[in-house]
Image (cartoon, grey):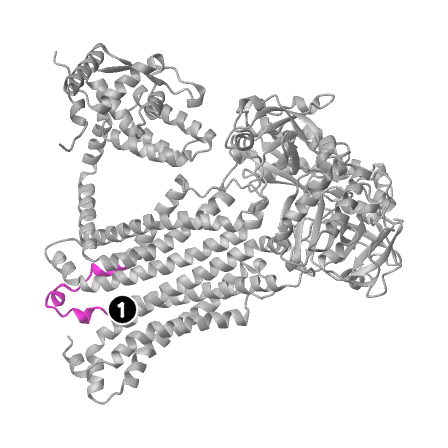
Amino acid sequence: MPPKLAQWLLRWTLPEGAAGDTILGDLLEEFRERTIDGRNAALWYWLEAVSVSLRYRGRDRRRARRHARSTMRFSGVWQSILSDIRYAGRTLRTSPVFVAVAVLSIALGVGANTAIFTLVDQVLLRQLPVTRPHELVLVTVRGTQYGSAWGDGNELSYPMYEDLRGHNEVFTGLFCRFGIALSLNAGDRIERVASELVSGTYFPTLGVTAARGRVIEPGDDTAASPEPIVVLSHAYWSSRFAADPAVVGRTLLVNNNRLTVIGVAPPAFHGTNLGNATQVFVPLRLAPSVVGGPLTTALENRRMRWLNVFGRLRPGLTPTQAQAALQPFYSSRLAFEEREPAFARASATVRSKFLQGTLAVRPAGEGKSDLRRQLSTPLWALMGIVGMVLLIACANVASLLLARATSRQREMAIRLAIGASRRRIVQQLLIESVLLALIGGAAGLAFAGWGSRLLLGFFVSADRILTVSTAPDGRVLAFTLAVSAITGVLFGLAPAWQSAAPAISPTLQSEAPSVGGGRSRLRRVLVVSQVALSLVLLIGAGLFVRTLHNLVTADAGFDTAHILSFTVDPGENGYDGMRAKQFMKSMVARLQASPGVVAAGVATQGVLEGGSWNMAMTIEGRPADSGQRRLTLNNMISPGYFNAMGMHLASGRAFDDRDQRMTTARHGNDAFRENDAFRVAIANEAFVKQYLDGEPAVGRRVGFGNDPGTPTPIEIVGVVSDAKYTSVREAIRPQLFFPILESSDARNLVVYLRTSADPAAMVGTARAVIHDIDPILPLHDVHTLEQKLDQSLANERLLASLSAIFGLLATLLAMVGLYGVVAYMVTKRTREIGIRMAIGARARDVLWLILRDVVWIVAAGIALALPLAWVSTRLVQGQLYGVTPIDPAAIAAAVGVLLIVAAIAGLIPARRAARMNPTAALRHD
Amino acid sequence: MRSASLGEFEHLLLLTVLRLGADAFGLEIAKELASRAGRRISRGALYSSLDRLEQKGLLRWKAAEGTPLRDGLPRRLYTVTASGVAALRESRQVLRRMWRGIEPLLKDPTT
């Protein structure tokens, strides 16, 4: 759709009826044509809307009459305000330097706030573009799980979803979804697309209808054999198929399954996961054939939890009520599951814990968003930081206004003397400051547009499709307007109040210097709080910078500088079982033989990508205490993996040609089948330390699962050095590695190449090798490990750099304030200084006289800041790594920076005072 | 009745409307102007010129039903009135008269 604000502008200026509607229609039609052509339609629409509005403004006589009436009703107040605005404009024009400094201060403050708010709004506050999003809830489960899971652990099994849907008194609709990347082949090339597997109730419950063709419907769930169909998102249809209407009805190869396109979703709808826009929607019933692997039996398997379940609440019900109403039924289903054969070997503790599982229902109008969860604290922290920057900027402008008020005392006194009311003068001064703030706000908006694009650069990675845009919309404009207006009142109120009360007669008799006392006290209070706030920001910045430094220099356990990684999935071109393993073997062999490659290895789970494969294990001779589990992070790897990663063996041996089973035995994601598949494993040092108390590991046996009597057929043949797994942040946990070539299949192969030179230069070689084996198989996620590391630290880098930038900005603003106050003080005490020098004070004494004040202001600021910092840094404790919230180094550095800057700000006017010529000073009035 | 004199752009607009016939809708007019006359103009200028010609009685429009691409909003179907045609003819006559005998003078404008 065209920009809302521009449409609103048009509606407001165009005549009513067909004359206006035809123009709106023309612009809309052309906007859509341009969108489809991929031209910048929003900017075009804005320009044309403005050009049309300018021509039509004021043409509608009826509107003009209405306007005239309303002006007349409020004419008294309006007249005075209008004339005040005009007067304010004239006065401001006479002091351009003051206006420039004030506007720049406000622009920086408001701009920073608007930029961060744009992201806060889009990432944290925006609701899904569906019917009544506030009624949507996410149903999750808590408690011990028995079986396997795919996701963050709060998902439901498909049979449980069906149970809830069948026994439902609280929802008007219930649907489930599963997000996954699928490969799509439209005949010319294979690419990865962000997909959602959805139940037939997905679109109807959300209230989303097709832009073309039809969407997936409830009938697609119940049909005896599910139809092979797919729905495209509007954005994907536009970009990949150039919005070709003939795509509906075409057949695409999705993970090597022939699916027919039945429709296109509406333009604004990008699925239910903000931050990862869905490109294609596939019926959930196709999961066994399209995804396969662990999902082969997932539609019947109660032990496999993988689905996000959303419901639409009946009107009037709260999530808490719904949760209470569903819990008894959920408990009864758990009891039913616990009697099933799958629990035959479960211990009593596990059973009783399992039965205590609960259901949680929480509002989900914003959908499911991993991005939101991940960015929530950093964004709110930044919002707090820029809020403080704005406060400091406000204090600066207030301080400037106070100084200005001194020079305008005569003007105010004259106005009061000739009968202006105090209220009227306050009104006039407030209008002046709000006008100033609005100009600053408008300038800030320009900063913000640039700033939020810059910000987004921190988040966007090449392989993630965002639905976040940085174009300012109505909400952001309203926010900026509100912030600017409040800012204006905030920094204008105190100066206005003070200015309106000069003692008339002494002022007019030109004894002005004696009446600035209250004013300069207020300015000192302002400066003390500026110093305090900026110190808090500097301390926070110090903590974030140290966190980033700790993470960047943390030893991940890999040779990060020389590794290139990419993903290949032979399944995308139909390889399975034996053929996939053959593919992998020849790929590794050829890569290994390529010039420039030191070592090549493959894992099924990429490192530092956030994902993990974890299992509770049984260790021979080391029974776990009751209620405790021997959790390990696992990975399947090829021979050569440790070499490729730069990890070294501590004892035993690495995998080699002995560790393969080139048969086609099937296994799923099921614990007991894995015990049939693997014969050997390699543990890391953390495993030996935590689970074996340092005793020799080689020769010891382990097994998947932790039920009593679990077999332990897998022998540990080696111990390898520790390395991180999900992220650099995590502590090193016990890990086990298994040989890929003993598993049934080789899917989703993450390949690591250690290179002798720059790894980025090896991309071409890698592509050529894969192309040689299979010309249409694509490489995904190609990057160096260093880039991956960088990407995984995007949030930390964002917080560190922005808090440092804003911290320094705040300090500079505070120092401008400090300088202003000291300089003013020097001017005011010129005569006193002259007298002191005349009776023998030396330059050093004068210097100290002025600096003593600076020291007091800074000391008071520091004293105020420390408790403030103590409270506020605790709020971001979760974002820190390797530092405590009261890190002495960070505090010392912040105080150091502040002292240096304060010394500069204080010394400049103090030295001027000390160099004064006493005779000239005495003549100063 | 003395026909109103036509500006160059008005002249182009009237010709465009005649040329498009039953397709003389706002958006089409803009496109035709761009492709045939090489004139890209802002929509504000386009509609105010069309309105001016309407006020002069040279053009008139009636609302036609909208398509789904424009959310069903109506379209303006323009036709040139009899006085519009007359004004065009008049304008062409004037130009012809003025051009008569000019061509030889253009051969060497410096003399």
The x and y percentages for residue A523 are: 30, 66
- Point out the residue furthest to the bottom here: A840
Which chain is indicated by disc 1?
A
**Quadrant of residue A307 in the image?**
top right
Q: Reply above or below: A566 against A73.
A: below
Of residues A152 and B83, the one nearer the viewer is B83
Residue A295 in the figure: left or right of residue A712: left
Q: Is residue A153 visible?
A: no
Residue A584 in the figure: left or right of residue A676: left
Q: Reply above or below: B86 against A337.
A: above
According to the picture, the residue beneath numbered tag 1 turns out to be A520
Q: Main secondary structure of the magenta part?
A: helix
Of residues A677 and A862, the one nearer the viewer is A677
Q: Quadrant of the C terminus of chain A?
A: bottom left
The x and y percentages for residue A421 are: 16, 53
**The magenta segment:** A493-519
Q: Quadrant of the N terminus of chain A?
A: top left
Residue A598 in the figure: left or right of residue A231: right
For the point 21% across and 77% down, the residue is A830
Q: Residues within 10 Å of mark 1 (few under 14, many from 20)?
A: some
Residue A792 in the figure: left or right of residue A814: right
The x and y percentages for residue A387 are: 42, 55
For the point 73% across and 58% down, the residue is A733
As for residue A495 lying within the magenta part, the answer is yes
**Quadrant of residue A392 in the image?**
bottom left
**Quadrant of residue B12 in the image?**
top left
- The amino acid beneath tag 1 is Ser
The x and y percentages for residue A675 are: 86, 46
As for residue A533 lying within the magenta part, the answer is no
